[in-house]
Image (cartoon, rainbow, N blue to C red):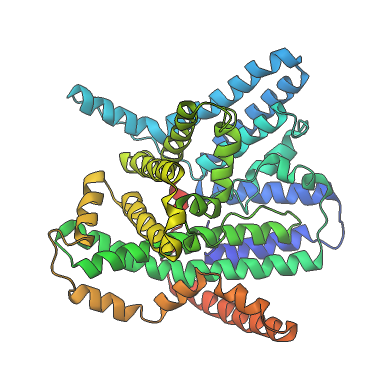
């Protein structure tokens, strides 16, 4: 079940809201049980088997947490190692074993036989949340949760279960039992949800069709330089509005139920360096690796060589986290090289206004690598972007797609830049509220028309 589906919008969410805000009781236990049951049903709708894997992971983590909390200070680390090791093992088996087995066969030049292990939806997100819980308890940032059901609520909470943001236990531990639902939070949450829904349905889905068709066409025959660039830009806009739209919906839904999740995006395409880009893109993931991998390895408080190694580990793991393909490993290491170059030479600061063009160019090349089926396919596509084996500078495909997105593309570019909040800040309060209301109503109406009239609703990060 996805947020942009008819089942979610017109059946699941209204029923959950009616049960949750039941006027007969405001008991926190009752409301938490409603959310827990709804969240497990939400996940089981798409994963009727793997929901039991998630429940097993929750119980296992709860037991390890309780044992670690009760152990003497010098006996806590083995429990942490056990808990983290079990979660890493689950990721390896369900996400990477098929790929590793294939690579072993290629390395040994023999048929190792085919294994095909299904990937549970959202496993990278809920395992990282469970690991963050163990880390937070170990480092004393949060008290151990002695109620397995409330730990289960933290992990399975349906607004953020499938594709993040990666909510850390310390961020919402107090709100599990002591949150307050207010009208202002509910209103703000619904507004955020509607804007996120519009990002997904009206912008991401449209850009996806151009990106998918262009990448497919480029794998079959040469395309023009302009078509290659348009396809790369379309994918950059697709993945931004797809993922940030989901995060907006998750944050909005959480707020409707009294939870306050941290922001996950902050206009990444206005960044003036790759370092700045990663402070703005998928913030919950980059901060997770910073706090639970980079800093424990020594961070920047070590020798230059060791710091280089620490950053390499973080970006190799960032690439691997996204999927079992060499393209993701190369994508992570691509950013490692860029960040090291910026840190060593500081050239991004010397480019002035052109630093934004540099970031756009590097990010677009990175997205080509991220989107491609293989490294070879990525290099071929990049070659077409720069005039190698192409159908000329422009072709009929380019003009057809450009004409089809002549209205949506400018709107997408407008909303990936902080123009709208800038305009709102400089308007009188009444005018700003009026503009917000008009945009919100238009977004809601067009989104509802879109969700009824289309079946193209894949969320990219469901694959991770």
Q: Is residue 164 visible?
A: no
From what the image shows, is residue 98 above or below residue 68? below
Residue in view at x 73 percent, y 33 percent: 148
Q: How many marks?
A: 0
Quarter occupied by the C terminus: top left
Choose top left, top right, bottom left or bottom right for residue 14. Answer: bottom right
Q: Is residue 177 visible?
A: yes
From what the image shows, is residue 339 above or below residue 76? below
The residue nearer to you, when weighing 102 against 221, is: 221
Residue 289 picture location, percent across and down: 55, 38
Residue in view at x 69 percent, y 43 percent: 154
Residue 138 picture location, percent across and down: 70, 26
From what the image shows, is residue 326 above or below residue 457? above
Residue 233 picture location, percent across and down: 35, 65
Choose top left, top right, bottom left or bottom right for residue 312. Answer: top left
Left or right side of 160 for 117 = left
Left or right side of 250 for 226 = left
Residue 297 picture location, percent across and down: 55, 27
Left or right side of 35 for 45 = left
Residue in view at x 24 percent, y 55 percent: 382
From what the image shows, is residue 152 above or below residue 368? above
The residue nearer to you, when weighing 311 against 198, is: 311
Left or right side of 102 for 10 = right
The residue nearer to you, when weighing 35 against 250, is: 250
């Amino acid at each position: 079940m996805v947020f942009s589906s008819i089942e979610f919008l017109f059946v699941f969410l209204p029923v959950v809201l009616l049960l949750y805000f039941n006027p007969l009781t405001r008991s926190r236990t009752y409301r938490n049980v409603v959310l827990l049951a709804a969240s497990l049903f939400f996940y089981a709708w798409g994963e009727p088997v793997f929901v039991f894997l998630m429940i097993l992971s929750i119980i296992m983590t709860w037991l390890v947490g309780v044992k670690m909390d009760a152990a003497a200070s010098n006996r806590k680390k083995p429990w942490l190692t056990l808990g983290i090791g079990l979660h890493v093992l689950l990721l390896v088996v369900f996400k990477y074993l098929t790929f590793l087995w294939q690579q072993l066969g290629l390395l040994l030049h023999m048929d190792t036989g085919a294994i095909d292990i299904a990937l549970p939806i959202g496993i990278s997100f809920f395992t990282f949340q469970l690991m963050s819980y163990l880390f937070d308890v170990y480092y004393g940032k949060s008290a151990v949760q002695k109620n397995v059901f409330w730990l289960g609520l933290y992990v399975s909470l349906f607004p953020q279960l499938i594709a993040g943001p990666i909510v850390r236990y310390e961020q919402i531990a107090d709100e599990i039992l002591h949150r307050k639902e207010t009208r202002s939070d509910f209103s703000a949450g619904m507004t955020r949800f509607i804007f996120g829904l519009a990002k997904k349905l009206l912008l991401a889905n449209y850009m996806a069709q151009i990106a998918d068709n262009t990448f497919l066409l480029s794998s079959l025959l040469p395309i023009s330089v302009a078509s290659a660039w348009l396809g790369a830009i379309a994918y950059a806009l697709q993945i931004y509005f797809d993922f940030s739209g989901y995060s907006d919906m998750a944050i909005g839904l959480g707020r409707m139920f009294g939870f306050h999740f941290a922001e996950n995006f902050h206009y990444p395409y206005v960044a003036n360096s790759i370092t700045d880009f990663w402070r703005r893109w998928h913030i919950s993931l980059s901060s997770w690796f910073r706090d639970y991998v980079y800093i424990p390895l020594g961070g920047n408080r070590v020798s230059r060589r060791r710091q280089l190694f620490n950053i390499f580990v973080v970006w190799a793991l960032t690439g691997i986290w996204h999927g079992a393909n060499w393209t993701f490993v190369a994508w992570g290491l691509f950013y490692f090289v860029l960040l090291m170059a910026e840190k060593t030479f500081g050239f991004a600061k010397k480019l002035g206004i052109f630093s934004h063009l540099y970031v756009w160019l590097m990010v677009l090349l990175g997205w080509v690598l991220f989107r491609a089926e293989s490294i070879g396919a990525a290099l071929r596509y990049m070659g077409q972007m720069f005039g190698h084996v192409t159908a000329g500078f422009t072709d009929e495909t380019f003009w057809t797609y450009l004409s089809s997105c002549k209205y949506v593309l400018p709107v997408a570019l407008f909303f990936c830049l902080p123009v709208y909040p800038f305009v709102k800040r400089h308007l009188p309060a009444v005018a700003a509220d009026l503009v917000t209301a008009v945009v919100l109503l238009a977004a809601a109406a067009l989104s509802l028309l879109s969700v009824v009239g289309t079946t193209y609703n894949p969320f990219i990060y469901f694959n991770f």
